[in-house]
Image (tube, grey):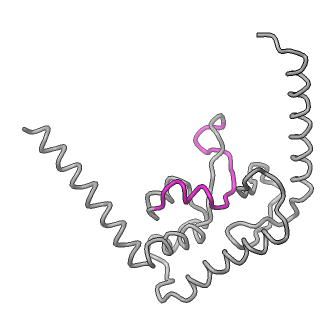
Amino acid sequence: MALTEEQRKRIEENRKKALEIRKKREMERGKEESVGGFFVPAPPQEKGLQQKRRKGDGATESKEAKKQRSNVLSGERDYCENSDDESLEEFERDASEYVSQTEAQKTYCLPKGTIDVLSFIERDNPHQRGFSKMKLFSRAEVRRRARKRYGGKSGLITEREKRKMKKYEKELKEIKKMSS
């Protein structure tokens, strides 16, 4: 299918805009990147490691928007700092600082919509280079969101156990169905 001259012009304009936006973002990105409310120096040897923050239309945030976002994040931190059950669970003690999307959904019982608004870093997929990049989320930020959602550490543990029981009952029902 042949493109009209008008379509070609529009494609070229959009390509130029995209390149300008990319250059702007690269210029704004400093030596340190924010991940989950804390700064992590970006190691130059890891080319596959990039910080991404979701924004509505990809435009840069105003100072007021950044201040408001930082107030929201500090409010979440205050919630966790003021709660008595800030302690880590047993599986979190020697765990990585980052968590995959699947692990965040299963372990912390968070829906995909909640995970989509969290900041993340991208790394090459360890299983196959041709696969899409893997998104890694800050475990501290994921834990904070999950505990806020379920009312603390005990609420999260209760939700996790409830889901395990539901899965067990479903499997038991399927086995009974197969044996009948």
> Based on the displayed image, in which of its 4 quarters is residue 36 positioned?
bottom right
| Residue in view at x 72 percent, y 73 percent | 38
| Residue in view at x 63 percent, y 52 percent | 135
Task: Judge whether 29 appears above or below 78 on screen.
Answer: above
Q: Is residue 158 magenta?
A: no
> Based on the displayed image, in which of its 4 quarters is residue 28 positioned?
bottom right
Looking at the picture, how far across and down is residue 23, in whole percent? 91, 48
In the picture, measured across the screen, residue 153 lies left or right of residue 70, that is left
Which sits in the foreground, 102 or 83? 83
Furthest-front residue in this view = 6
Furthest-top residue in this view = 1
Looking at the picture, how far across and down is residue 117, in whole percent? 62, 59
Magenta residues (range): 110-129
Looking at the picture, how far across and down is residue 54, in whole percent? 70, 56
Q: How many marks?
A: 0
In the picture, measured across the screen, residue 38 lies left or right of residue 111, that is right
In the picture, measured across the screen, residue 96 lies left or right of residue 27, that is left
| Residue in view at x 69 percent, y 51 percent | 122
Looking at the picture, how far across and down is residue 174, in whole percent? 19, 43
Which sits in the foreground, 137 or 23? 23
| Placement of the N terminus among the 4 image quadrants | top right
| Residue in view at x 87 percent, y 34 percent | 14
Task: Judge whether 92 appears above or below 78 on screen.
Answer: above
> Based on the displayed image, in which of its 4 quarters is residue 5 positioned?
top right
| Placement of the C terminus among the 4 image quadrants | top left
In the picture, measured across the screen, residue 165 lies left or right of residue 97, that is left
